[in-house]
Image (cartoon, coloured by chain):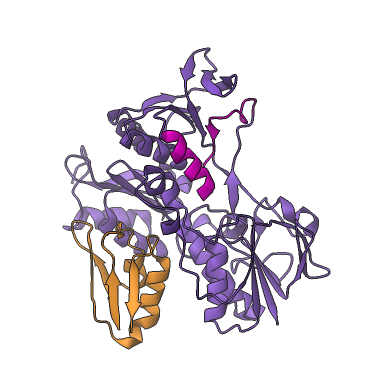
Amino acid sequence: MKVHVDMNLCQSHGECVIAAPDVFELGDDDVLVWKEDVPEERRAAVEEAANVCPMMAIRVED
Amino acid sequence: MRRIVVVGASLAGLRAAQAARAAGFDGEIVLVGDEHHRPYTRPPLSKELLAGQQTPEGCGFPCEDLDVAWRLGVPASALDRERRTVVLADGDEVPYDRAIVATGCRARPWPGEGGDLPGVFTLRGIDDAIALRAAFEARPKVAIVGAGFVGCEVAATARKHDLDVTVIDIAPQPMLPLGPELGARCADLHRAHGVDLRLGAGVAGLRGGERVEAIELADGTTVDADVVVVALGALPNTEWLASSGLELDPGVACDPTLTSTTDPDVLAAGDAASWPHPLAGGERVRVEHWTVAAEHGQLAGRNAVAPAAERVAHTTPPYFWSDQYDVKIQAVGFPTRADALEILESTPDGGRFVAAGGRDGRLVGVVAFNAAKRLAWYRRQLAAGAAFDDVRQAVAADEGALGAPVGAAR
């Protein structure tokens, strides 16, 4: 599956980093970096990350 | 079980409905809301929406695909547990097998005279934000009573529009939950951006004729104002439950799984829920933050469709934030429960830092200014129940930390 983050919306809350630390990470400048291709078995964690994002910036595509 | 009634159609209620569906519940879900709007996100109301950078439609949560029966524009007026029915203000009755209370909070109104004068606003719902934004267009002199989260954010937004802004609070500092040292930094921040900040100042009354004209302070001075924003915090919407027999404190008293202490078929979520949190020493807390509403809703929805013995506790350290000018304030845990907040790391200019506090030897609260990446590390320590001394030592030894706080030996 593909993970998209709208960086116009992201405000570096870091909720996704807690939900799926293997997929999302904050850089030293507090800007989010993430893996775009994520194995299917991590779907639940990524969907959780999308769910808890206060900015609704994360989208998961099949 | 055939029907879940979720009372409250904001974030917590929406997430509860979504979670019940995600858990496989295929009965009926009724979502009751007192506003006419479908669920929307509130954080932009004091910031992007008020600033005109975000549209009201843009604040809506996506929920077109959610299989629920909407009952919007009508508040619930009673919960009849004997008949397992939610009574609505229009007289309709909605029977339930499980009820989830997610009725949130409302803005605390101005307690004295003058609160109903035109030009006096509170900010809680999207209609409030739209009205305040319209009022800002006339470039009014703005006075804000209350220097908490909403008051400070509205002040920052109003200053962004170069409006004349006075913020008044009886407390000696803004953002009281952050403690005196961080509160002083917030005060500096607002003053540096041109806010006339009156601290330790009581309000004698709101004055005006046709509309509000001034705020009279307790010392006899007046602050001229065309727009007054009353930002005195929020009150939980649980009065409608007074006749239900549920334990209220005034939130719905719950066990760790967000199940009412009185009735296993009633759960609560978000601002209206009061539940024992491990980081609060097991004391019941009520937390009015976005992420808690989201987590609660999700958990309550899942727990509502589970047998009582399989329900899961909410133990996540609460996370909240506030954006003021170019500063993102983020906090985790319960900073107000800490013995004191101590700055553990900081950039040399003090622009980015993390403060933390312990209680009974354990880390209980963390506040970061423009330090999101660092905060994630502290969140894991909080969730793990780390000792405060261990955290302090680990930060001092961590080359990835922002640096030694000014004046600290290293």
Task: Say which of B177 and B401 sits in front.
Answer: B177
| Residue B288 location (% of width, % of height) | 52, 52
Which chain does orange denote in the image?
Answer: A
B134 drawn magenta = yes
The residue lying furthest to the top in this view is B220
Q: Is residue B126 left or right of residue A6?
A: right
| Residue B304 location (% of width, % of height) | 63, 75
| Residue B68 location (% of width, % of height) | 60, 74
The residue lying furthest to the bottom in this view is A40
Q: Is residue B141 left or right of residue B247?
A: left
B244 drawn magenta = no
| Residue B220 location (% of width, % of height) | 53, 12
Residues in magenta? B112-136
In which quadrant of the rendered view does residue B92 lie? Answer: bottom right
Quarter of the figure with the N terminus of chain B:
bottom right
Task: Say which of A35 and B176 sits in front.
Answer: A35
- Name the residue at 42% across, 27% down: B140
- Name the residue at 26% across, 55% down: B393
In which quadrant of the rendered view does residue B21 lie? Answer: bottom right
Task: Say which of B407 and B370 sits in front.
Answer: B370
Which chain does purple denote in the image?
Answer: B
| Camera sees residue B280 | yes
The residue lying furthest to the right in this view is B82
Q: Is residue B117 left or right of residue B335?
A: right
| Camera sees residue B355 | no
